[in-house]
Image (tube, rainbow, N blue to C red):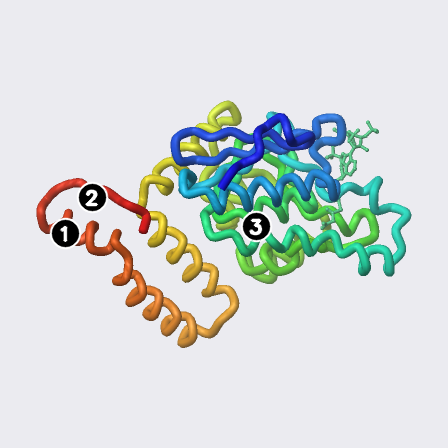
Amino acid sequence: MSTKTATEYQFILISQEERVGIIQLHRPDALNALSPDLMKELVDALEAFDADDAIGCMVLTGGEKVFAAGADIKKMAEASAMDMLLVDQLARWDRIRKLHKPIVAAINGYALGGGCELAMMCDMIIAGENAKFGQPEINIGVIPGAGGTQRLTRAVGKAKAMELILTGRQFSAQEALEMGLINKVAPPELTIEEAKKLAKTISEKPAIAVRTAKEAILKAFDTTIEGGLDYERKLFYLLFASADQKEGMQAFMEKRTPAWSNR
Ligand code: CAA
């Protein structure tokens, strides 16, 4: 699977370090506002890394002072409801939910509106002490449209989600950590390194087990406990068809490091 070279993208930068695929939002003149063109490039790049056997985990980051200031207000301001419905630009965002490999978000500065929602679409979040999260859509006469009411509520509970979405106030990385929305707060200059470190650890694990674990964890959000437990058990049994299960258990018994084939 070929991955586009960085020069073929206008609004993102891509790179690879060992088995970690890194994508940086790069539309500095508009605070990384998530225009349809930027989102097309982002989803294309994520899907390319997802299909690339050389990649085990992804990192999504923005700039030093802004991750993303949300969907592009200037491109939406004059739209009619029918324009929004027929173009359905948020359907593209939904493709991120279908990715198999884990994504670690590395957030410095603003992650507002769609920026906060994009961070929550990732599987883990490392935030710099300067990060400012928020769902300010209420202040421009709308509500979150890319999953904010659903993912924030599941992550932090009803009362907090109500307060944050109805007031639109910004909240800090420390508050996000205390609410259980993110994994870690880092000094801003180390945010990306911490995210890469976490992604590198995951990228060295057996790939099929990683993708299966991600699938099982996400299932917890849209099923009953009984349905989820059944689903998990079947995935667990299925992994006994993988070469990595044989290798992992054999290596344990032989007291040696496993050599994963990711098959
Ligand atoms: N869309 C388009 N342009 C944006 C933008 C956005 N979301 N956010 C910032 N910009 C633009 C500004 O218009 C400005 O452009 P000009 O230089 O051409 O005037 C430039 O980026 C710099 O912005 P500011 O001058 O406002 O910078 P600041 O440092 O004073 O403030 C900020 C920073 C607090 C992030 C402020 O820009 C802001 O509040 N932005 C909007 C945040 C927001 O409401 N996001 C939600 C969008 S709706 C959404 O996301 C829907 C959804 O659920 C999918």
Q: Indicate the position of residue 155 as horizontal and vertical percent values.
A: 53, 56
- What is the distance, in whole Å, between disc 2 and disc 3 at their CAs? 32 Å
Residue 24, image x, y percentages: 58, 32
Q: What distance separates the C-alpha of mark 1 from that of mark 2?
A: 8 Å
Near mark 1 (Cα within 10 A), the count class, few <14, some 14-19 or many ≥20, is: some
Q: Is 222 left or right of 167, judged from the image as shown?
A: left
Q: In the rendered structure, which amino acid carries the disc numbered 1?
A: Gln
User: Observer-nearest residue: 176 or 61?
Assistant: 61
Q: Is residue 225 left or right of residue 84?
A: left
- Residue hosting label 3: 121
Give the quadrant of residue 56.
top left
Which mark is first along the chain, 3 or 2? 3
What percent of the width, then of the height, locates residue 58? 48, 40
Report if residue 253 is visible in the image.
yes
Relative to residue 195, is residue 150 depicted above or below?
Answer: below
Identify the residue position indicated by label 1 in the image: 250
Which residue: 31% across, 44% down? Answer: 205
| Of labels 2 and 3, the one closer to you | 2
Residue 160 picture quarter = bottom right
In the image, residue 221 sits, relative to residue 171, either above or below, namely below
Where disc 3 sits, the SS reads helix
Q: Which residue is mark 2?
A: 258
